[in-house]
Image (spheres, rainbow, N blue to C red):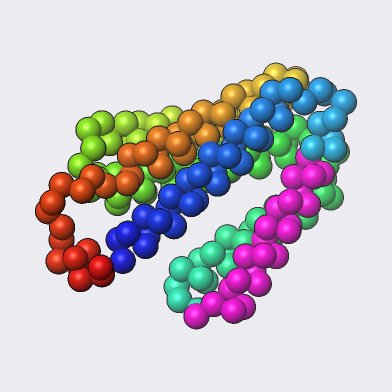
Amino acid sequence: MLFQSLDKLKRQSILAAILMMALGVVMLICPESYVNTLVVTVGYGMIIFAIVEMLEFIVSKKALIHYITFTIALFIAILGVFILIYNQDLLKALGWLFGFVLVQDGLFTLLNALLFARRSNRKGWWMLIVFAIVLMTLGILIFLNPWWDSPTLLMKIIGGALLFSAFVSTLRFIWVWPFNNGKESAEDASER
């Protein structure tokens, strides 16, 4: 069971690192004239992601985690629709969207640091907790957004924060996977 969860976490960490790195680079190099197109694309992407998650809920076994995922997907779909409707308030939409993404990624990293990285027997696993707190702080700062008046500066700050999030996702991938120290738990030994 533990290794199945770790395999899923490994895939999620790799995907999150690639996605955050791509978004961060796009945010850093995106000219100000294309910001509106970028926000509309993100809005449609959120709606498509939410629809996929809702369809997975329909075919799932309906455990508690599936209801939680469905609720989050519904929230993401509503947020995507609001981004498409209110894309004229571009800076607020960007601040809210990426602030929420960074806080969520920080909470996910904190949870994985406490559940998996602590058990991995790697030195320095506690650094994931520090990085998770930094991610959540960056998310809250972007969400509150003291840079409302400058779209270029806001894009650069969000891009840098997303690149940091990709770095944290990569570290999470490395620190979460356990060492094989010859001491297997009874649960892990019975799974093999």
- Quadrant occupied by the C terminus: bottom left
Residue 135's place in the image compared with 157, above or below, is below
Rendering coords of residue 73 (x, y %): 62, 61
Q: Is residue 140 in sight in this rendering?
A: no
Q: Is 59 inside the magenta-drawn segment? A: yes
Residue at image position (49%, 51%) is 12
Q: Residue at x 13, y 51 (%)?
A: 182
Q: Residue 21: horizontal and vertical position, in percent?
A: 60, 33
Highlighted range, magenta: 39-61
Residue 8, image quadrant: bottom left
Depth check, front residue: 25 or 71? 25
Residue 37 x/y as whole percent: 85, 38
| Residue at x 58%, y 60% (from the top left corner) | 72
Work out whether residue 159 or residue 99 is closer to the camera in this orientation and state it.
Answer: 159
**For the stretch drawn in magenta, what is the main secondary structure?**
helix
Q: Is residue 89 above or below residue 182?
A: above
Q: Is residue 69 left or right of residue 118?
A: right
Whether 15 is among the magenta residues is no
Q: Quadrant of the N terminus?
A: bottom left
Q: Is residue 115 toward the left or the right of residue 171 in the image?
A: left
